[in-house]
Image (spheres, rainbow, N blue to C red):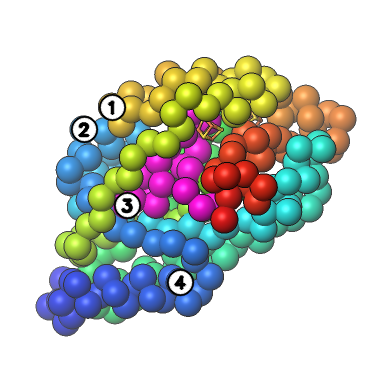
C-alpha cells in the first residue's frame, strides 16, 4: 500500500466537493465500524473489512415521480436508467480519487440485484445513506431525505480511508402510513426501521416483485414506484416539500 499523501479531513472535503459538483444533491460519510452487527445482516461478508462508506444521492426530477401516481411511466424508466448511470459515473470518479490518494475503494453498483428479490444486493445503499445522515429509512424500506423524500438514487463507495464520519438523523415517518396505503401489492407492513432487523421483517419483497411482474404483462416493463410518489416528503405541494 502506498503512503497516504493527504490528511483524511481534507480528503473528505475534496470528495464531497467532487460529488456535489458532479450532480449529487447530498453526500456524507458512514462509519461502518459502529454498525458492524447491523451490517452482518445486510452486506456481503467480503465487504465487512471496510471501515467507511461514502454515500451520496442524485434526485429524480419531482415531476417524473409525480407521473407515477397516474400509473406506470416510460419516462420514469428512462430516468431510472439515466440517474443510475450518473450515480455509477460519480462512484467511479470517487474511487479514482481515493485510490490516487493511496486508499482502497469499492464502488457498489448503483442497481445490481444479486438474489431472487428486490433489495437483494452485495451492500445496501440505504444502510450507508442512513449511517451517513442523508436521511432515515422509511416504512417503505427506502431512504427518505427530508427535502427530496425517497425520490432519489443512492450511490456508495466503500473505503479503508478513515474519513471523519457523519451521524444518522432521526426517523421522521411518525404516524404516517401513506406508503403502506399506496402499495398495490400490500408489500409494506408499516413497521418502523430498526438497524438490527432484516428488511424482510418490514417489506415483503416477493409481493412487490410479483406485482411488478403483473405490470410487465400489461405495460411491457416492470415498474411501480407508488411508494416513492406517495411519500409526503419530497412532494412539492406537501408541508414537507421544499
Ligand atoms: S414499488 Fe410498488 S409494489 Fe413495490 S413496495 Fe413500492 S408501492 Fe409496493
Ligand atoms: S410515506 Fe410516510 S411512512 Fe412511508 S416512508 Fe414516507 S414518511 Fe415514512
Please tell me which residue is depicted at 65% across the width and 35% down the height of the picture: 230
Q: Which mark is residue 196?
A: 1
Q: Which mark is residue 20?
A: 4
Which is nearer the N-term, disc 3 or disc 4? 4
Q: CA distance from mark 2 to mark 3?
A: 17 Å
Is 226 placed left or right of 163 in the picture?
right
Q: What element does badge 2 sit on? A: helix
Please tell me which residue is depicted at 34% across the width and 59% down the height of the picture: 28
Q: How packed is label 1: few (under 14 Cα within 10 Å), some, or many (20 or more)?
A: few
Q: Is 49 above or below relative to 190? A: below
Q: Nearer the viewer, mark 4 or mark 1?
A: 4
Does 141 lie within the magenta span? yes
Q: Is 65 above or below relative to 103? A: above
Which is nearer the N-term, disc 3 or disc 1? 3
Q: Which residue corresponds to mark 2?
A: 37
Q: CA distance from mark 2 to mark 4?
A: 31 Å
Please tell me which residue is depicted at 41% across the width and 25% down the height of the picture: 192
Which residue ends up furthest to the left in the rendered image?
Answer: 3
Amino acid at each position: 500500500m502506498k503512503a497516504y499523501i493527504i490528511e483524511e479531513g481534507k480528503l473528505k472535503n475534496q470528495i464531497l466537493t467532487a460529488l456535489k459538483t458532479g450532480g449529487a444533491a447530498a453526500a456524507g460519510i458512514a462509519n461502518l465500524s459502529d454498525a458492524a452487527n447491523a451490517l452482518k445482516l445486510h452486506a456481503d461478508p467480503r465487504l465487512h473489512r471496510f471501515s467507511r462508506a461514502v454515500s451520496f444521492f442524485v434526485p429524480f426530477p419531482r415531476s417524473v415521480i409525480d407521473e407515477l401516481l397516474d400509473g406506470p411511466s416510460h419516462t420514469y424508466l428512462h430516468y431510472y436508467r439515466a440517474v443510475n448511470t450518473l450515480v455509477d459515473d460519480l462512484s467511479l470518479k470517487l474511487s479514482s480519487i481515493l485510490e490516487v490518494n493511496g486508499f482502497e475503494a469499492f464502488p457498489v453498483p448503483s442497481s445490481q440485484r444479486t438474489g431472487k428479490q428486490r433489495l437483494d444486493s452485495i451492500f445496501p445503499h440505504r444502510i450507508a445513506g442512513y449511517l451517513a445522515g442523508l436521511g432515515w429509512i422509511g416504512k417503505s424500506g427506502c431512504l427518505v431525505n427530508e427535502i427530496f423524500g425517497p425520490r432519489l438514487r443512492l450511490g456508495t463507495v466503500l473505503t479503508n480511508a478513515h474519513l471523519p464520519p457523519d451521524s444518522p438523523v432521526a426517523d421522521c415517518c411518525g404516524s404516517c402510513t401513506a406508503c403502506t396505503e399506496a402499495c398495490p401489492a400490500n408489500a409494506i407492513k408499516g413497521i418502523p426501521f430498526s438497524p438490527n432487523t432484516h428488511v424482510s421483517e418490514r417489506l415483503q419483497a416477493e409481493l412487490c416483485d410479483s406485482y411488478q411482474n403483473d405490470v410487465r404483462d400489461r405495460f411491457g416493463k416492470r415498474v411501480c414506484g407508488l411508494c416513492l410518489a406517495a411519500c409526503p416528503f419530497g412532494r412539492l405541494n406537501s408541508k414537507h416539500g421544499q
